[in-house]
Amino acid sequence: MSAEASLDGMTDPSAALSSAHDRTVVVAGAGGAAGREVCAALTAAGAHVVAVSSRPDTIEEIAAAETHALDLADTDAVAAWARALRSRRPSIDGLIHLVGGWRPGASDDDWEWLERRVLTTLRVTSRELRDDLSASSAGRLAIVSSASVASPRWGMVNYVTLKAAAETWVAAIANGWRVKGTPTAAVTFVVESLDGEGVGDALAQSMASLWELPHEQLNGVVATLGDDAGAA
């Protein structure tokens, strides 16, 4: 099944209003432009949005039920934060991972800087919340990857290697959920650039609509977003 076919209709905002209602959705890396749009779309859909950023100033006046400043690469800090969230909410139904960064080249310093943001934050948060998502009646995990993974160039080798690793990590989670038969889905959205016209809105609406399709149709999908693809 193609990504385009499996995600048809995901951007119907009226449908998302009921499906995401009162679901607890963690948006990691909420302070960027894309994160703010995703938080706004999920909040409009009725979700209990938990916005998380390493910088408290980036999540001021954001559309979310809760905001937290947290180093998402710190295993102990994330575990303590998750325990507190579980005590407040009946379930954790979504993890939207938007933590990222960009540096070109192949240097060790740039690798370490990118690895902590692109991959470690995903590993730490998804490991901590994986069982919570599995226990949800409709758990969802979503990340954003780059179209450059399909055509890597040496000038961005650190970045594309880590993005490819992030895609593999999510694919492994998706396969594990498929084997267990849980009502969960892990999805990767691929973009040329989040700065492209309409991409941020398409991403936000697609994220808000993740609960609109059955997990069997979503789990493991890699979907391309862009000017031509819309929210396919």
Image: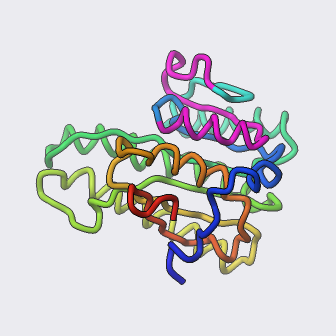
Is 152 rendered above or below residue 81?
Answer: below
Say which quarter of the image contains residue 82: top right
The front one of 121 and 138 is 138
Q: Residue furthest right?
A: 90
Q: Residue furthest bottom?
A: 1
Q: Measuring 59% from the left and 69% from the top, which residue is drawn there? A: 7
> In which quadrant of the rendered image does the N terminus lie?
bottom right
Say which quarter of the image contains residue 43: top right
User: What's the image's color scheme?
Assistant: rainbow
Q: Measuring 18% from the left and 44% from the top, which residue is drawn there? A: 104
The front one of 96 and 223 is 223
Measured as percent of width and height from the top left, residue 67 is found at 65, 25
Q: Could you tell whether 197 is left or right of 19 in the image?
A: left
Q: Measuring 47% from the left and 59% from the top, which residue is drawn there? A: 230
Is 199 rendered above or below residue 9?
Answer: above
Q: Could you tell whether 134 is left or right of 29 in the image?
A: right
Measured as percent of width and height from the top left, residue 219 is found at 62, 71
Q: Measuring 83% from the left and 43% from the top, which residue is drawn there? A: 22
Residue 56 inside the magenta-drawn segment? yes
Q: Could you tell whether 124 is left or right of 208 in the image?
A: left
Measured as percent of width and height from the top left, residue 215 is found at 70, 70
Magenta residues, as a range? Answer: 34-62
Residue 193 inside the magenta-drawn segment? no
Q: Could you tell whether 43 is left or right of 228 in the image?
A: right
The front one of 97 and 146 is 146
Measured as percent of width and height from the top left, residue 28 is found at 56, 39
